[in-house]
Image (tube, coloured by chain):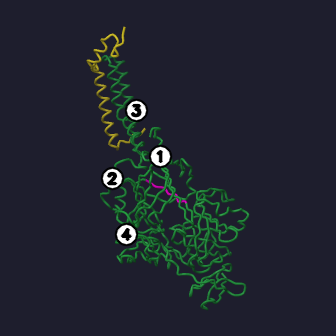
Amino acid sequence: MKTRVANCPSCGGPVEFRSRTSLVTVCDFCQTVVARGDKEVEDHGKVADLALTDSPLRRGVTGKFRGKPFELVGRVQYKHPAGGVWDEWYLSFSNGKWGWLAEAQGKFYLTFEKKRASKLDLPAMDTLEPGKRFKLGRVGEITVAEVGVAQTGAAEGEIPWNFRPGAPHPFADLHGNDKQFVTFDYSGETPRLFIGAEVGLEALQLSNVGWDGTGVPGIAGGAAETKVAALSVNCPRCAGPLTLLVPDETERVTCPNCSSLLDCNNGKLEFFQTLKGRALKPVIPLGTKGTLFGEEYTLIGFMERVARYEGTAYPWTEYLLHSPQVGYRWLVRNQKHWSFVEPVSPHEVTLSYGSAMYDGENFAVYDRGDATVRYVLGEFYWKVSAGEKVMTADYIAPPRMISSERSENENSKELNISVGTYLTVDEVEKAFGVEDIARPFGVGVIQPKPGFFGDLAKLWGVFLAALILFYYSCKSLKTAPVDGEFFFWMLVAVSAVPLGSLFYLHSFEVQRWSDSDYSPYATDEE
Amino acid sequence: MKIDLTSAIAKFYLGMGSILCVLYLAGAISGFKFPVSSYASAASRSSGGSWGYGK
């Protein structure tokens, strides 16, 4: 790369434009945003300190993508409308091209700007709704996941667009097949189009990558190496001590001493809300580590949510799990039944009013309504508050459940889809090393149906065949007169268990659907 | 056709069904007659059966 060196218009220190196509660079000495001008460089104001994120990347790392070498030369941190920041790294390729590498919650999305996007006639931002599907040129069908207005925050290094700190960033994120990822950027007069995919870091063939044994590349000097594992702080309300387990990502935390909900900005706490109502105690203590599906998680947050129907509240609790490798997951406990919940791309799920299709399986609608946060404890990666409400729809195909959550505020509309998998209490106890968790009594919504009927039916067939064989054998041998009534009652006796189990399985399904308005077993009288 | 007999109910049914089959075989060979209840026999003696209708 041919480096152009200039002097920072603010402090006079040297600033470099290593890429011939970068528009802006951030002065490493005084954090002034320095833009290329026609003749001289221009001062675009100062940026704040970078928020310490969990990123394993750093500026200066080199790599290859599809055989083409690149250098990671800069990044911008965006403030998400729901709170929190995400990093956007800029990859400068040797042929002058740029790659945009967005990093959020442990996932990486590499996109490239599609020139002549105007020919594709991108939809206006106000026409986009989360969940909406449409075809986009050669990309094919894509699904809107989020529409919102973020804000540019801190930055470092070289940036391939005319970055200004604190500027609004209207955007839409869309997902397609095979982990395709598309962003519409509405910051300018005409929308810009970025097309790419979710990638693993191994696809970028990064240099200076040292594997720390956890499966995550730890780059020498990267943010992940310098991060603080946990931070002890004091509540600004009661001065009581509390510990932040994920201080670089936590946006809200509760004080265990005075039940205040606190805003958390990179470890700095401010009072936000006093939590009212009865205090709940999680059955797995916060801070507990556990391994589920081969991944180690730390339990960092706990919340109670409630759905109201005809004046009755139906509460359930959710446990927020964090892993530096895979990001965030949930454990959900509903009527003492447990499930493990993972996010999935909205494009992978086809939602309709009565059903959802995912992974080749049909899920039947179970419930629709609003879910409201009633109680929170611990740390959260978004600005959670008591009273926060989302529109939900649940679809079931035991032992799995698809949940769709739509949230909307003045700056963002988002659709989050997740898949939950049933866990037995024994599995939860074993995973987290806890004992004596209360057992459920009734049938869980996605509790697997007992699978014994198939074996009983096979045995039933064997016994019926044997009885019929004995009946006709004795009749033909004429050893003694054969009593037909005795034969009939033996057939009944041998059928009692399989027929009884059929009745039990029917009752099992009826009970599973008893809280649903969409029960296939409901009668008109109900 | 493989039958999984690990569940308790499958084991129970295997035992119960086997006993019933053996009992039937033994009963059929020995000429066992199913006992007729006194009510049934009384009904059968009446002209119209248990419903009381008859000629």
**Residue tagged 1:** A517
Looking at the image, tell me whether mark 3 or mark 1 is earlier in sequence order.
3
Q: Label 4 lies in what chain?
A: A
**Same chain letter for marks 2 and 4:** yes
Q: Main secondary structure of the magenta part?
A: strand
**Residue tagged 2:** A439
Residue numbers of the magenta segment: A415-421
Picture quadrant where residue B16 is located: top left
Q: Assess whether residue A219 is covered by the magenta stretch.
A: no
Q: CA distance from mark 1 to mark 2?
A: 26 Å
Determine the colour of chain A: green
Looking at the image, tell me whether mark 1 or mark 4 is earlier in sequence order.
4
Q: CA distance from mark 1 to mark 4?
A: 36 Å
Q: Label 1 lies in what chain?
A: A
Q: Are marks 3 and 1 in contact (CB under 8 Å)?
A: no
Residue type pointed to by label 4: Ser
Label 2 secondary element: loop
